[in-house]
Amino acid sequence: MPALARVAPLVEPSKATAAFAADVLAGLQAERKTLPAKYFYDSAGSRLFERISQLPEYYPTRTELGILREHAADMAGRLPDQAALVEFGSGASTKASILLGAAPQLAAYIPVDISSEVLHHEADVLRRSFPRLAVIPVDADFCQLFEVPAELASLPRAGFFPGSTIGNFEPHEACTFLRNAGRILGRGAAFIIGVDLVKDRAVLHAAYNDAAGVTAKFNLNLLARINRELGANFNLKCFEHHAFFNRERSRIEMHLASIKRQKVKVLGETIEFRAGETIHTENSYKYTPASFSALARGSGWSVQALWTDANQYFAVYFLVNEPMSRAQRDT
Ligand code: AVI
């Protein structure tokens, strides 16, 4: 009997569950065990992330909000009249509200997300706050190419990607994402992106190892989710949260470490763990202003402006989709 049939005997597993199952098995059967970070965000994981973003040690959310509030007018002044602002992976629209409030010249806001319920709820909230703005959500995976709603297709576009989610992509994936965004937004378009910067190791370490243990819960929720949705039997007490800064790769790595030798049943397969063996669950790349500018340039965007906080913990970039000529690139 296929393993999934035991989990949900009466219904065909949805495409999403089948993809989740395939990714989980592939990751756990790999030589170096890994699980894709995108699966952190079920409803429990999203609530935990919300709590992380308010932790005293987790500086990115607070710092980016500060930069947006302080420089919204400058950012907004660079956006064209009657443009549509496309937010990639919108979730809660707190950050977009700051920008929209400073940019009355915008005609439309297009939040793009796969979590449809939050997307439509947030769209309603924004319609009430900005009655003159057309708010048209798009249910889509923002990492793939998607269509802008036909009724807004003729408007100039600007992109918005706050939260430093770009840091959760491998650099080559960040490049693909930026190139796709360039195709969606069009030549000459602006793109406002939040990027977490390299900083003191102790500050980084604390942000991913908070005293209240919320990040640990967030990490372990991935195993809880696999138990809930795929009928696995991970004992959460037998795994612990590890997070550290890998300076060579310029990234925080999150892992779940097995505290002993053990076997776990996942989708009918037995997964064996050595004591201390880890499942690599997330990378969070930290850029320098120079390294992110180079990534942006190599992906077809030029840097028009960059705002940061007093500690230089976080940066908000204003990019323009105008690839440099070969002559410019070579100089
Ligand atoms: C969503 N993303 C930018 C967070 C980060 O900092 O990389 C996810 C996160 N992981 C642990 N804490 C927060």
Image: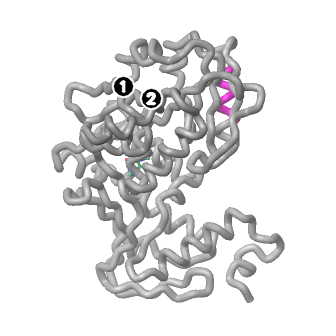
Q: In front: 327, or 199?
A: 327
The residues colored magenta run: 120-127
Which residue corresponds to mark 2?
320
The residue shown at (63%, 25%) is: 109
Which residue corresponds to mark 1?
304
Residue type at mark 1 is: Gln
Left or right: 275 in relation to 121: left
Of labels 2 and 1, earlier in sequence is 1
Image location (x, y in percent) of residue 8: 75, 73
- Label 1 beta carbon within 8 A of ligand 1: no
Mark 1: give few (<14), some (14-19) or many (20+) Cα within 10 Å: few
Give the quarter of the image for residue 217.
bottom left
- Residue occupying the far right of the picture: 10
Q: Residue 252, relative to residue 14: is it above or below?
A: above
Q: In front: 326, or 163?
A: 326
The question of residue 250 being in magenta is answered with no
Residue type at mark 2 is: Val
The residue shown at (39%, 19%) is: 69
Mark 2: give few (<14), some (14-19) or many (20+) Cα within 10 Å: many
